[in-house]
Image (spheres, rainbow, N blue to C red):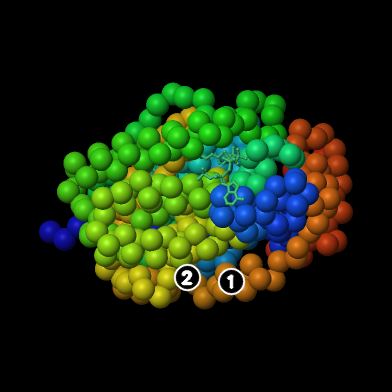
Amino acid sequence: MELMKIGIDKIGFATSDLYLDMVDLANARQEDPNKYLIGIGQAKMAVIRPTQDVVTMAATAAKRIISEEDKKNISYVIFATESGIDNSKSAAVYLADLLGILPNVRTIEVKQACYGATAALQLAKGYIALNPESKVLVIGADNARYGIKTPGEPTQGGGAIAMLVSSNPKILELENPTAAYAENIMDFWRPLGHSKALVDGKYSSGIYLDFLRNVWDEQFKKTGFKLQDYGALLFHLPYTKMGLKGLRQILQDASVDDSTRLTREFEYARQFNREVGNLYTGSLYLSFLSLIVNSDSIRSGQRIGLFSYGSGAQAEFFTGILQPNYQEGLAGVDYQSILNKRQAVSVSEYEKFFESHIFDIENIELDYQEDNSDFLLMGVQDYKRKYLGR
Ligand code: COA
């Protein structure tokens, strides 16, 4: 009996229409621009308006890919975020409302730092195995906030990835088995009541590499896949240099062929992340999107390896096979031109937006005249968020 294929049918992305140039940030912080451009590996950072949050960005990302037909078949919305807007109610129910897919649907939120969207994807895979006619909308959306003048500042950013998971997917068939690894550690966390993450940056970068070694070895034991079996290796990219460090660790004893191929594809896969910054949950999947949009050497039928990492900490290494018409799953959206059309802000404007973040506010009416997005936050009334979809 031929096994049913399950995986990513469509993928969409949205970020802010504003960005900060990392050279401007470096100059303002009296750092050498090359520290950010090369040492951290970031060129631009998304700056999020107060009228945008994880729900509005997720709605924009999802709207770019889902058709009216898809809406009828989506029976589950799994929203992964670590910058959620409520401690109890899921962001998924707001999203399903804005997209018009209520009421015959399940809506939940999942959390495990930047690993959340991978947990959601794996849950969706199992769900589709039992419900092959259904589709699951998986979201990874975040606003990465460390704080002005903190070491983490150049690794901020934000945006949302939306993935439609189904049987017979257009883009990526998810394979079994996968390798997971968890330990209870304090490398990055955000205590209740805090709007900014706390992080032990150097420690977290070291743990990331330790976890990568663990799941890579475990996956090799389970599958026997060698470097030559991969068309590309993708990494969670809190900043793109982190993924490069991961790749270099894996390539330590690689042949020239493997090393050239995997380094070339990694460069395609970090292009968009360099221009947006950290998406937390969405970063690995933005890197996947960047690969399939930008690479002219990746081929359908090739195996992609994905390393997911979420502080605290959880890692998983999994694989997928690129499908024959994978470009169709992009729904014709031109992401490079969306990124090119963004507007630059100055460091002081960025700081103003950063401080205007809506968090624990009882009442506010927001001026949204300058926000041309399809979905936006109009304000908060009695601690209830008011959204607009247009
Ligand atoms: N040209 C080129 N590279 C330069 C440079 C220059 N002029 N100046 C510094 N660098 C390099 C450093 O050598 C270093 O590279 P390395 O990591 O390969 O050694 C890199 O730039 C960063 O410099 P460093 O001094 O280590 O930066 P920092 O102390 O300001 O902190 C982080 C960097 C990543 C730790 C910090 O931004 C952070 O805490 N980020 C959030 C945590 C995070 O994302 N963790 C990831 C796990 S999920």
Nearest to the observer: residue 381 or residue 118: 118
Which residue sits furthest front?
32
- Image quadrant of residue 385? top right
Residue 195 visible in the snapshot = yes
* Mark 1 residue crowding within 10 angstroms, few (<14) / some (14–19) / many (20+): some
| Residue pictured at 24% horizontal, 59% vertical | 255
Q: Is residue 387 above or below residue 18?
A: above
Look at the numbered discs 1 and 2 and tell me whether their residues touch, using CB distance below 8 Å: yes
Instruction: Give the structural element (helix, strand or loop) at label 1.
Output: helix
Residue 300 coordinates in the image, percent (x, y): 31, 71
Q: Position of residue 303 (x, y in %)?
A: 28, 61
Q: Residues within 10 Å of mark 2 (few under 14, many from 20)?
A: many
- Asked whether 52 or 70 is in front, the reply is 52
Q: Which residue is under mark 1?
A: 336
Q: Tell whether 204 sits left or right of 157.
A: left
The amino acid sitting under disc 2 is Val
**In which quadrant of this rendering is ligand 1 seen?**
top right
Kindly identify which numbered label has been placed on residue 293.
2
- Where residue 42 sits: x, y (%)? 59, 55
Mark with earlier residue (1, 2): 2
